[in-house]
Amino acid sequence: MAEYNPDEVSPEEATASAATLRQQRLLILWIVLGGLVFVALVVLAVFGLMQSGEQTAKIRDIFIIFMAFESLVIGAALIILVIQVASLINLLQNEVKPILDATNETVNTLRGTTTFLSENLVEPVIKLNSYLAGLRRFFQLFGFKEK
């Protein structure tokens, strides 16, 4: 087995590493751009709120509408989440639990079978082999059988 040498990199590994590095840089770029856009929106919101009362009321009303829409979306997502959790619980109770029960029953049957085989087959064979080994050694000691 050859030792790993970091200086010797295959072309496939170099290409994969370059692609991963490119993806990481692209992700960092998008995060930075998203942060800049967020900061710009906050600055615009503060600037808009510092204007006259009429414009501030409009921004407030738009923000209230946006928050109501967001709460509707979050409510729908929570309903979908509750339905998914209910289907998972149903799956666990009606499909996985019977499989586990059947597996447990099979393991118990297998345990009984191995105990039965051990007591009725393996132990007598081992005893017979030990008696035969003792008899063979007895014959070797008294010279009836050569080594």
Image (cartoon, rainbow, N blue to C red):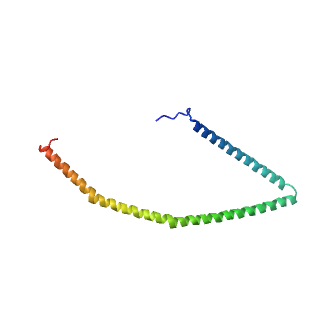
Res. 84 image quadrant: bottom right
Answer above or below: position of 23 versus 110: above
Q: Total marks drawn? A: 0
Q: Position of residue 123 (x, y in %)?
A: 26, 56
* Residue at (46% x, 63% y) in the render: 100
* Residue at (86% x, 58% y) in the render: 55
User: In the visual, does 9 lie left or right of 59?
Assistant: left
* Residue at (29% x, 58% y) in the render: 118
Q: Residue furthest top?
A: 7
Which image quadrant: the C terminus? top left
Res. 28 image quadrant: top right
**8 or 29, which is in the foreground?**
8
**64 or 18, which is in the foreground?**
18
Answer above or below: position of 39 versus 60: above
**103 or 89, which is in the foreground?**
103
Q: Position of residue 22 (x, y in %)?
A: 66, 41
Q: Position of residue 34 (x, y in %)?
A: 73, 48
